[in-house]
């Protein structure tokens, strides 16, 4: 990896399992699981405006190092980047040639 590429510190949040919850389904509040370094590239709003969406929305590509802890991230988790909460839209399979995992993260507000 080239030093300096992973400029952003992100936090990964996951729902807590509430005691006494049937089947142990995670239904609690989101709680911090871990933090890691990431590279972020925001997409332009051109696609949203072309679609005529009346939403404040943002989409970005997030790259993180491929490691055992980062492989536990799922689409049900939330990511915080620079104080903003994002949901995970897609997670690509780990790229073993570059040691990276790519995630598409989105933030949609309004409607």
Image (cartoon, helix red, strand yellow):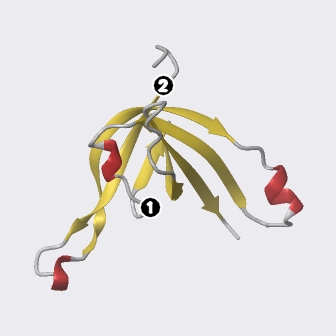
The crowd level at tag 1 (other Cα within 10 Å; few <14, some 14-19, many 20+) is some
**For the N terminus, which image quadrant?**
top left
Who is closer to the viewer here, 91 or 60?
91
Earlier-in-chain disc, 2 versus 1: 2
**Where's residue 17, x and y in %?**
20, 69
In the displayed structure image, the side of residue 103 where residue 32 appears, left or right = left
Q: Verify CB contact (< 8 Å) between mark 2 and mark 1.
A: no
Q: Residue at x 11, y 74 (%)?
A: 19
Query: Disc 2 designates what residue?
Result: 6
In the displayed structure image, the side of residue 69 where residue 24 appears, left or right = left
**Label 1's element?**
loop
**Where's residue 24, x and y in %?**
17, 77
Q: Is residue 1 above or below residue 13?
A: above
**Where's residue 95, x and y in %?**
47, 40
**Label 2's element?**
loop
The crowd level at tag 2 (other Cα within 10 Å; few <14, some 14-19, many 20+) is some
Query: Which residue in the rendered view is the most extreme toward the top?
Result: 3
Query: Disc 1 designates what residue?
Result: 75
Occupied quadrant, residue 62: top right
**For the C terminus, which image quadrant?**
bottom right
Query: Which residue in the rendered view is the most extreme toward the left?
Result: 20
**Where's residue 43, x and y in %?**
71, 43
Q: Residue at x 43, y 37 (%)?
A: 96
Q: Residue at x 46, y 50 (%)?
A: 93
In the displayed structure image, the side of residue 111 where residue 52 appears, left or right = right
Q: Is residue 87 above or below residue 34?
A: below
């Amino acid at each position: 990896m080239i030093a300096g590429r992973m400029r952003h510190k992100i936090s990964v949040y996951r729902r807590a399992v509430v005691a006494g919850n049937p089947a142990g389904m995670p239904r609690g509040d989101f709680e911090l699981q871990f933090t890691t370094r990431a590279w972020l590239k925001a997409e332009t709003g051109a696609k949203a405006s072309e679609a005529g969406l009346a939403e404040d929305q943002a989409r970005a590509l997030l790259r993180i190092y491929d490691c055992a802890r980062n492989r536990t991230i799922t689409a049900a988790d939330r990511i915080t980047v620079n104080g903003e909460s994002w949901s995970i839209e897609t997670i690509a399979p780990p790229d073993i040639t570059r040691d990276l995992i790519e995630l598409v993260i989105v933030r949609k507000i309004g409607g």
